[in-house]
Amino acid sequence: MTTAIIYILASIGAGVILVAIISAVRFVSLHFLHPKQPLERYKRSSAEPAYALITGASAGIGFGIAKELAKHGFGLVILGHLQDELQAAKKALEVATPGARVRVIVMDAIKATPVDMQDMIESLKDINLTILVNNVGGSAVGPPPFRELMTYSAADVDVVINQNSRFMALLTSLMIPVLSNSSSNPEDRSLILNLSSQGMAGVPFIVMYGATKAFNHGFSVGLARELENSPNTRNVDCLAIIPGDVLSQGNSKGVAEAAPKADYFATQVVYTVDAAIRQRLRAVSPYWRHDVEWRLMGWLGEDIVSQEVVKVIGMKRDAWNAHCTKTE
């Protein structure tokens, strides 16, 4: 009996060690063993470059992803709601990568209709779109940005849903036929990246924002499974991106000292996609510190997680409220 128990415990221990080793290898491969030329499978052999449509690309993470994609030979379609910001972003991208092909689309994600989106896609028929980056998002409600849900008007609720989830879902549904038919070569693939957030875990004082990011995650995971199991869309990969705290234009107050800047985070996005798809991940935190944080949140109890989340969001709320008071 004693020998049998020892054997069982040893087998369990060996299994645990094996799982830990495999997890460590996958983690290192994902975050530190980057390809020299990322996203090659989403390029095309023709003289014209493959293009990426990036929403919310005039600043922050979206702009950073656009800049990184241009460096690796992709043409760009950058979408945003402010003409001047988009033109400035276009010039900056062309300076960063001489010869970069950049188109600008002015569209308000909060107000855009399905007809507007379809017309926009029709206007891009002359280029080969192989990547869609659903980055646009935020919490475009009146100040202060961090406040209780009971202070939201019906219009506030609709604005956050429209900006973060409705636009993404509608645009993606319209883009799937474009992406799945971007090449006659069965070896060529297309890609959808959907920006979620660690906020999907449930954050106080920006409840609507966190809820829409949870939608984006579930939408992306479900869509990835759907695409690979439908004969006409098996050549389209879909991946949710889960950022933690990132210093950017839209997240500039109360940011953790160790938080990466938007450009660096965007680089990590581009360089981790290949490994994430190869590992059959449906969602990924491209920056390694964020990945560790996200894994820990799954292991810790609710009391500890809730305490830390409230502390972090409280610091952000205080910083933003102080900023709003100064600018009144």
Image (tube, rainbow, N blue to C red):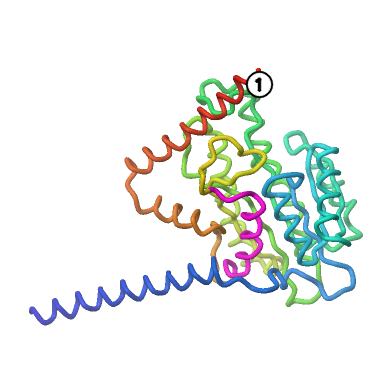
Magenta residues, dominant SS class: helix
Comparing 140 with 144, the one in front is 144
The residue to which callout 1 is attached is: 327
User: What x and y, as percent, mark residue 9?
Assistant: 19, 74
User: What x and y, as percent, mark residue 49?
Assistant: 85, 67
Above or below 158: residue 168: below
**For the residue labelled by badge 1, is the local secondary structure a helix, a strand or a loop?**
helix
The boundaries of the magenta stretch are 259-277
**Residue drawn 25% across the image and 74% down it:** 12
Above or below 246: residue 43: below
**175 sits to left or right of 283:** right
Above or below 97: residue 16: below
Q: Quadrant of the N terminus?
A: bottom left
User: What x and y, as percent, mark residue 228?
Assistant: 63, 67
Comparing 193 with 37, the one in front is 37
Q: Quadrant of the C terminus?
A: top right
Comparing 9 with 171, the one in front is 9
